[in-house]
Amino acid sequence: MNLPNKLTLARVILIPFFLLSIYISFPFHYAVALLIFTIASITDALDGKIARKNNLVTNFGKFLDPLADKVLVIAALAVFVDLREVNMGAVPLIIISAREFMVSGLRLLAANSGTVVAAGIWGKLKTAFTMVAIIFILVWLSVCGDFSFNLPEILTKAVDNVIIPVLIWISVALTVISGGVYLKGYWHMIDSDK
């Protein structure tokens, strides 16, 4: 297994540790979750860059890399919904999950015809922005939960009711756009008569 694939696999392995660090209360557990998620996000940036630079792109990597991203992001968003950190409920999570299922289905159809669907620019932009949004929310959880700073109420309301929802809805918009791009590009593979 080459280095990029090991990095991708490491990202998958970090997901349960991220979840445990969120849900098990111990000193600075949100900060630990932030650290784990940030490391996982860095592996996402590194694996593709190393693979392309050193001509180590494999079908395994093309398959597992986007899958690892999907599971990591959906796990984080599901946690935020569970913790009520995302005030708009499960709607963004449902939209993002639906897009991921659709793209995965398109990838399967493409694979049946011998085509591997690599992540496009919109998919990469969606993933990068969503990970930055999640990191921001984890920083906020750490500031409020781990360090218990006595922040002005106007600031906490602004972050909870404006900044976080805006970040999440931008992520949703990028998710819908990137899903539409994939659907348009691979629509010819969907045959209702088969």
Image: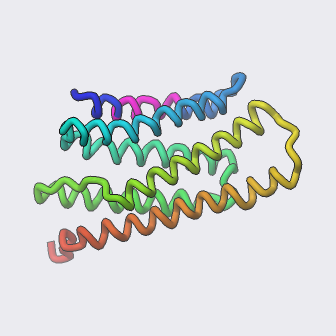
Picture coordinates of residue 153 (x, y %)? 88, 51
Asked which colour scheme the image uses, the reply is rainbow
**Quick check: is 96 in the magenta stretch?**
no
Left or right? Give the position of 89 relative to 174: right
Magenta-drawn segment = 8-17
Query: Who's the residue at 51% across and 52% down the image?
Result: 130
Splitting the image into 4 quarters, where does residue 126 fall? bottom left
Outermost residue to the front: 53
Q: Does 17 appear above or below 140?
A: above
The answer to which of 13 and 147 lies nearer the viewer is 147
Picture coordinates of residue 34 (x, y %)? 59, 34
Query: Who's the residue at 66% across and 28% down the image?
Result: 29
Q: Main secondary structure of the magenta part?
A: helix
Q: Does 60 appear above or below 132?
A: above
Outermost residue to the bottom: 193
Left or right? Give the position of 181 relative to 129: left
Splitting the image into 4 quarters, where does residue 140 fall? top right
Picture coordinates of residue 39 (x, y %)? 49, 32
Query: Who's the residue at 25% across and 39% down the image?
Result: 53
The answer to which of 100 and 31 lies nearer the viewer is 31
**Quick check: is 10 in the magenta stretch?**
yes
Outermost residue to the top: 27
